[in-house]
């Protein structure tokens, strides 16, 4: 192994601790998924009010990405990750004691905020501690492992709500944050040779310069649209509409619908390392890989939606596997950010990209709900809304793929000649 390919000593410890913080964030994000009925009774709310929790968290998460990225560039990932863990712990504690709908909404608002302060920090740590060749593999492994937090939230929270009640269950969940916060405090360093790093002061001039420079580079925009077009289908299925679509739209049993969503999570976890190795070995083909994956997702959805009557079970299994691959594929957008921006604005650029998929997911969650109401619960019509975002996203990926390669020819013709580009 060459020096350039080696990671710093302690890199895996920092990654594992940061990954624990990310797992905790996903756990808290998903902890309401199994508590819907209990929450409806506790706060005396309708199904529409219950869905507001999901939309609020998505909106806050997406809206916080750029501010969090700027904060990481200014104060370092360790400080922001610590703040995120503290916010998650306090907000889940508040949620445990909430007895009214407005109080619960406020608590989930801060859960979304704490969640948003974790992932960008972890990516910054990965870039600081691992070699350039290893970063893509670790990045695409990070996302799928983090999503395991959603699985961890399901069974323990179901048991806790049944046996301990609302307040004790969420207090128990909040207590995990204390452990993770201490672990980050003790073992995480911003860089191998510095516990904490600081960037330029956050003046309006510096903020404007950082965001403008990041967005100006076509590689950042290519990463944005990659994240936008790959992630939303799996997020929408996993977060809200998958279960109703399978049970009411495709008339599967409730048990089989649960199996399908589990298969999708497994597909996410297995696809991440494979895609990480592919883009590490073939960085020139990153956008080509994204285009192929999205077109595959579109093709399988088209077959399911066009199937006369209900699609067979095996076809739905194929659907969730292919759609699941889109989750880790969205992480390829972060690798474009890494190779398109200097380290001092990397987190701000990452924040720009990270909001894309969640923005697309939020739009789709709302649109599907509206179309279902307008069409009398026609799930095939509602799920067809995805073609609007696929069309927009694919066109923009192709557009900025061309621009990114043209930028590379201009800035680094020797690298272009060696066919080791960033598109």
Image: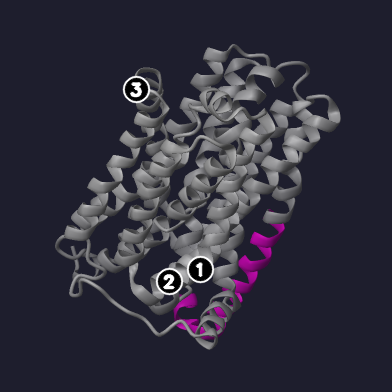
Which tag is nearer the camera, tag 1 or tag 3? 3
Q: Dot 3 lies on which element?
A: loop
- Tell me if I can see residue 120 in this picture: yes
Q: Dot 1 lies on which element?
A: helix
> Which residue is nearer to you in this view: 416 or 334?
334
Q: Which residues are magenta?
A: 394-417
Which tag is nearer the camera, tag 3 or tag 2? 3
> Pointer 2: what residue?
71
Instruction: Look at the image and say whether residue 397 sits in the magenta stretch.
Output: yes
Q: Dot 2 lies on which element?
A: helix
> Pointer 3: what residue?
164
- Vertical order, 120 against 157 (above or below): below
Tell me the quarter of the image containing the N terminus. bottom left
Q: Residues within 10 Å of mark 1 (few under 14, many from 20)?
A: some
Q: Position of residue 185 (x, y in %)?
A: 21, 59
Mark 1 near mark 2, Cβ–Cβ under 8 Å? yes
> Which residue is nearer to you in this view: 388 or 106?
106
Give the CA distance from mark 3 to mark 2. Answer: 38 Å
Mark 3 near mark 2, Cβ–Cβ under 8 Å? no
Q: Which residue is farthest left?
A: 9
Task: Give the residue drawn at x 35%, y 58%.
Answer: 122
Give the CA distance from mark 1 to mark 2. Answer: 6 Å
Task: Give the residue drawn at x 34%, y 41%.
Answer: 174
Q: Quadrant of residue 198?
A: bottom left
The earlier-in-sequence mark between 1 and 3 is 1
Q: Which mark is residue 67?
A: 1
């Amino acid at each position: 192994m060459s020096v350039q390919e080696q990671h710093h000593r302690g890199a895996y410890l920092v990654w594992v601790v940061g990954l624990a913080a990310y797992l905790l964030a996903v756990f808290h994000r998903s902890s309401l998924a199994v508590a819907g009925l209990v929450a409806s009774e506790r706060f005396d709310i309708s199904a529409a009010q219950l869905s507001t929790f999901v939309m609020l968290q998505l909106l806050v998460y997406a809206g916080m990405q750029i501010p969090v990225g700027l904060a990481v560039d200014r104060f370092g990932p360790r400080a922001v990750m610590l703040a995120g863990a503290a916010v998650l712990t306090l907000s889940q504690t508040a949620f445990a004691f909430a007895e009214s709908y407005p109080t619960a909404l406020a608590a989930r608002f801060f859960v979304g905020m704490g969640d948003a302060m974790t992932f960008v920090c972890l990516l910054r740590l990965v870039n600081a501690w691992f070699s350039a060749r290893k970063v893509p593999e670790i990045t695409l492994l990070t996302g799928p492992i983090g999503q395991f937090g959603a699985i961890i939230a399901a069974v323990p929270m179901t048991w806790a709500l049944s046996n301990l009640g609302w307040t004790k269950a969420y207090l128990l969940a909040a207590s995990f944050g204390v452990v993770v916060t201490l672990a980050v405090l003790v073992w995480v360093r911003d860089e191998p040779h510095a516990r904490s790093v600081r960037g330029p002061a956050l003046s309006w001039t510096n903020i404007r310069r950082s965001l403008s420079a990041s967005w100006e580079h076509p590689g950042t925009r290519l990463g944005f649209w990659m994240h936008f077009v790959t992630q939303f289908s799996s997020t929408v299925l996993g977060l809200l509409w998958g279960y109703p679509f399978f049970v009411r739209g495709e008339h599967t049993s409730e048990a089989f619908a649960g199996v399908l969503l589990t298969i999708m999570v497994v597909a996410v976890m297995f696809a991440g390392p494979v895609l990480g190795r592919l883009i590490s070995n073939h960085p020139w083909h990153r956008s080509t890989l994204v285009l192929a994956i999205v077109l595959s997702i579109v093709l399988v959805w088209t077959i399911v939606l066009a199937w006369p009557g209900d699609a067979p079970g095996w076809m739905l299994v194929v659907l969730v596997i292919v759609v699941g691959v889109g989750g880790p594929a969205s992480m390829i957008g972060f690798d474009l950010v890494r190779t398109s921006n200097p380290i001092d604005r990397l987190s701000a650029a990452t924040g720009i990209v990270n909001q894309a998929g969640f923005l697309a997911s939020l739009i789709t969650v709302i649109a599907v709900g509206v179309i279902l109401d307008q069409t009398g619960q026609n799930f095939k019509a509602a799920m067809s809304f995805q073609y609007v975002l696929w069309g927009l996203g694919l066109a923009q990926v192709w557009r900025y793929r061309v621009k990114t390669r043209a930028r590379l020819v201009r800035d680094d013709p020797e690298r272009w000649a060696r066919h080791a580009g960033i598109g």
